[in-house]
């Protein structure tokens, strides 16, 4: 790939690479590069998710798990309803939502894989504290999936790593390696799907913004979101600092932006009702 082409692709100049490579994020309309088929990434994520379920100790706290599922269900519904009502194609159409609660008090983290596979670690519940707080974290993670940030990141990696990989990925070569990773530990598995790689600043900010919208549409009090980040900041100085903070840095920046957006979003995206 020559340098000019490389730069165009990287800057998402929407040139044709023989496949449809560019689209935009719903609601924010930010242009994004998509070289990798979403369905392939989702399939890979689903396989890794199954392995995580086998390797990690899942919590037997049914009440807590039900609360997570209830928040998730509300978000799933309000996201789909919102896009249907706005005549925008629902970005979660191909999703196969699933929720697990991992019993590990030391891990203060949560993630959502592409395609809607969600994990909450029991440690983060000390920081989220209440339903609105948990909804804030889930909304943010779900927003990464709805905005297809992993597809975008994987596409950029392909461009950065050499063009020949595109063929490899499109033919399934790269993605099929997951089948040979049974011996890998959870960290290794999650690294493969990029769970421990931070998203870029724009994507993080976008997930903050969309997360607030999805929580508000689902009827949660998004004024709790700023408080979550304050608690994260505090927990960072404690004995078990949140792993969440290693992929979600600079809370001061976020707190400022989130608090600036909150009242506008409460007003513009009230709880959505069916019918
Ligand atoms: Zn994030």
Image (spheres, rainbow, N blue to C red):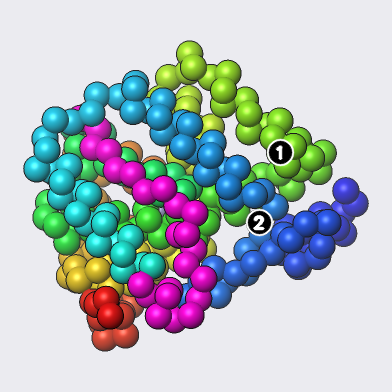
Residue at 20% of width from left, 49% of height from top?
68
> Percent x, y for residue 271?
23, 77
- Name above or below for residue 100 compared with residue 39: above
Point 14% across, 30% down: residue:
60
Q: Which residue position holds label 2?
A: 34
Can you tell which quarter of the image residue 134 is in?
Answer: bottom left
Q: Residues within 10 Å of mark 1 (few under 14, many from 20)?
A: many
How many circles with numbers are drawn on the protein?
2
189 drawn magenta: no
Q: Nearer the viewer, residue 35 or 82?
A: 82
Name the image quarter holding residue 167: top right
Q: Is residue 231 visible?
A: no
Furthest residue toward top: 183
Task: Say which quadrant the C terminus sits in.
Answer: bottom left
Q: Is residue 51 visible?
A: yes
Sequence order check, earlier mark of 2 and 1? 2
Question: What residue is pinned by disc 1?
Answer: 169
Q: Secondary structure at mark 1?
A: helix
Residue 63 position within the rendered picture, expressed as x and y whole percent measured from the top left: 9, 43
Q: Give me the C-alpha separation between circle 2 and circle 1.
A: 12 Å
Judging depth in this view, the residue of 122 and 43 nearest the camera is 43
Q: Residue at x 81, y 43 (%)?
A: 163
Residue 62 position within the rendered picture, expressed as x and y whole percent measured from the top left: 11, 38
Judge by depth and name the residue closer to the eye, 212 or 16: 16
């Amino acid at each position: 790939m020559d340098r000019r082409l490389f730069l165009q692709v990287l800057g998402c100049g929407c040139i044709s690479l023989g496949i449809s490579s560019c689209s935009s994020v719903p609601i924010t309309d930010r242009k994004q590069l998509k070289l990798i088929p979403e369905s392939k990434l989702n399939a890979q994520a689903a396989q890794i998710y199954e392995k995580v379920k086998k390797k990690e100790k899942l919590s037997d706290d049914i009440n807590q798990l039900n609360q997570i599922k209830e928040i998730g269900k509300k978000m799933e519904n309000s996201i789909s309803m919102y896009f249907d009502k706005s005549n925008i194609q629902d970005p979660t159409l191909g999703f196969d939502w699933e929720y697990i609660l991992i019993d590990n008090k030391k891990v203060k983290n949560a993630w959502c894989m592409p395609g809607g596979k969600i994990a909450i670690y029991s440690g983060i519940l000390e920081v989220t504290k209440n339903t609105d707080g948990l909804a804030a974290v889930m909304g943010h993670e779900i927003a990464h999936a709805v905005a297809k940030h992993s597809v975008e990141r994987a596409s950029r990696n392909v461009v950065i790593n050499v063009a020949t990989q595109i063929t490899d990925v499109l033919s399934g070569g790269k993605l099929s390696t997951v089948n040979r990773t049974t011996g890998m530990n959870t960290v290794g598995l999650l690294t493969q799907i990029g769970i421990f790689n931070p998203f870029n600043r724009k994507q993080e900010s976008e997930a903050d913004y969309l997360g607030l919208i999805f929580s508000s549409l689902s009827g949660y009090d998004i004024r709790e979101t700023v408080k979550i980040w304050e608690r994260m900041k505090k927990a960072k100085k404690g004995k078990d600092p949140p792993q969440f903070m290693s992929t979600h840095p600079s809370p001061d920046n976020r707190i400022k932006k989130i608090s600036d957006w909150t009242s506008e979003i409460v007003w513009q995206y009230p709880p959505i009702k069916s019918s």
